């Protein structure tokens, strides 16, 4: 069971703004499905071959996950720069863990996460 929704709402107004201000943690930049407004969500981004893997600790019904899937793209501020992410899709835990390098810390089993968000990096040569 992903983290409770009330915890996500609390973090949205307390933890997230502080983390964004620090500028240390990766942040996914996405457009609201309804509002079209730009949002930034700090999170852990795992670099995998050809893209990034994200762990939706509040579940795939989180606004940021739904926004990225609906838009079909997002940007990621990471390592002092910004990259464009494309082709977002949900994958199961077995596929996600197979992509992670050996020794990468996994989310706690008690979260019982079944799906993860995988994106591709936009190709620099078109």
Image: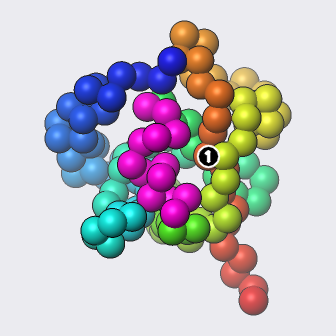
- Provide the residue span drawn in magenta: 58-70
Residue at 73%, 35% in the rendered image: 92
Q: Position of residue 26 (x, y in %)?
A: 44, 50
- The residue at which mark 1 appears reads as 117
Task: Judge left or right: residue 83 versus residue 80.
Answer: right
User: From this viewpoint, is residue 34 visible?
Assistant: yes
Q: Position of residue 118 (x, y in %)?
A: 66, 50
Task: Judge left or right: residue 73 versus residue 35.
Answer: right
Residue at 67%, 65% in the rendered image: 87
User: Local crowd at mark 1 within 10 Å, few (<14), some, or many (≥20)?
Assistant: some
Of the pair 52 and 24, the residue shown nearer to us: 52
Q: Quadrant of residue 114 in the image?
A: top right
Residue at 46%, 40% in the rendered image: 61
Task: Judge left or right: residue 125 versus residue 121.
Answer: right
SS state under label 1: strand
Q: Is residue 11 above or below residue 107?
A: below
User: From this viewpoint, is residue 80 visible?
Assistant: no
């Amino acid at each position: 069971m992903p983290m409770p929704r009330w915890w996500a709402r609390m973090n949205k107004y307390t933890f997230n703004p502080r983390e964004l201000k620090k500028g240390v943690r990766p942040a996914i930049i996405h457009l609201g499905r309804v509002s079209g407004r730009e949002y930034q969500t700090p999170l852990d981004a795992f670099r995998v071959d050809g893209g990034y893997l994200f762990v939706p600790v509040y579940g795939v019904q989180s606004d940021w996950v739904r926004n990225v899937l609906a838009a079909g793209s997002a940007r990621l501020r990471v390592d002092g720069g910004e990259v464009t992410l494309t082709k977002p899709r949900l994958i199961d835990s077995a596929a996600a863990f197979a992509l992670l390098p050996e020794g990468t810390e996994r989310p706690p089993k008690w979260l019982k996460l079944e799906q993860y968000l995988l994106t591709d990096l936009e190709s620099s040569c078109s």
